Image (cartoon, grey):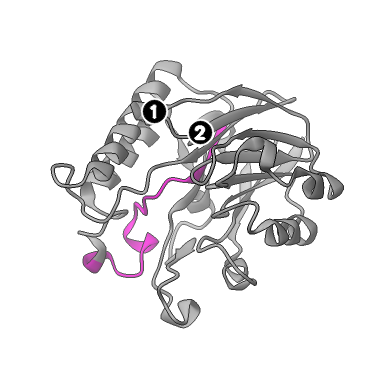
Amino acid sequence: MPFTLATWNINSVRLREPIVCKLLAEEGPDILCLQEIKSPVDKMPVEGFADLGYRHVVAHGQKGYNGVAILSRLPIEEVGREDFATLGHARHVAARLENGVTIHNFYVPAGGDVPDREVNEKFGQKLDYLTEMRDWFHANAPEKSILVGDLNIAPREDDVWNHKQLLKIVSHTPIEVDHLGQVMDSGKWVDITRQDIPQGLLYSWWSYRAKDWSAADKGRRLDHVWATPDISNAGHSSRILRDARGWEQPSDHAPVFASFDL
């Protein structure tokens, strides 16, 4: 059952319903994983998505912030949601396809502005969240699984516009990169995007602060698609839809795509 999957931090699904529908209509992924939906599940604009063929929805939402959702043209069932670091936030939901593939959709905490847990509680929460992700996957040994989402870390030197300048900036600090690496190792996850695009600068996020985000091009690859080794060779056709960052009233993230022949 071949399918195409996309992951996108939408930064409010209600505010940006028009560009979600634009993506679904123009790009047609079989599955769209959204982060930062900022909405309770019963307030999501699911009717418009259903009209486009996305009648299956698994979501974990909350009012005003966080929240994750999986929209699908293929039947899915919810198989879990975890509250890592006991934050009480809607940051994870998992769904299973009929072919047995489990999709984990994550919104990892951003971590605030100062990369020091002694003076910045949010940074400590981010590290704790990643540690508990690591331990959970180590204990549960995922198989036939895909992990996607805004992981809020750009791990490689070519995942940021300037490696040296960003070494002390939250999202690219060595301690965050190390913690994310431990999560990858715990599930033996394969970075599908970089499996397909092994070299070169690659970004999925550009700050709202830049007057001309595209010309400045100071991006970071914060959004990821991973798979377990048993299905990683089935992944292909990875791409980032950079143009979506320039759509009307855009998110500061662009959608990341991958296809799987399973």
Q: Position of residue 131 (x, y in %)?
A: 30, 30
- On the image, which quarter does residue 130 sit in? top left
Going by the numbered disc 2, the residue's amino acid type is His
Which residue is at 73% across, 47% downward?
Answer: 45
**What residue does disc 1 label?**
84
- On the image, which quarter does residue 158 sit in? bottom left
Q: Position of residue 96 (x, y in %)?
A: 66, 26
Relative to 56, residue 23 above or below: below
- On the image, which quarter does residue 220 sit in? bottom left
Q: Position of residue 174 (x, y in %)?
A: 22, 50
Q: Nearer the viewer, residue 131 or 60?
A: 60
Q: Residue furthest top?
A: 139
Q: Nearer the viewer, residue 122 or 31?
A: 122
Of helix, strand and loop, which one carries label 2?
A: strand
Which residue is at 43% across, 27% downward?
Answer: 83
**Separation of disc 1 and disc 2 at Cα?**
9 Å
Q: Is residue 55 magenta?
A: no
Tell me, yes or no, whether the two marked residues, 1 and 2, touch with CB atoms within 8 Å.
yes
Going by the numbered disc 1, the residue's amino acid type is Phe
Relative to 5, residue 202 above or below: below
Relative to 43, residue 187 above or below: above
Magenta residue span: 146-165
Which circle marks residue 92 in the picture? Answer: 2
Is 4 positioned to the left or the right of 174 in the image?
A: right
Residue 203 seen by the camera: no
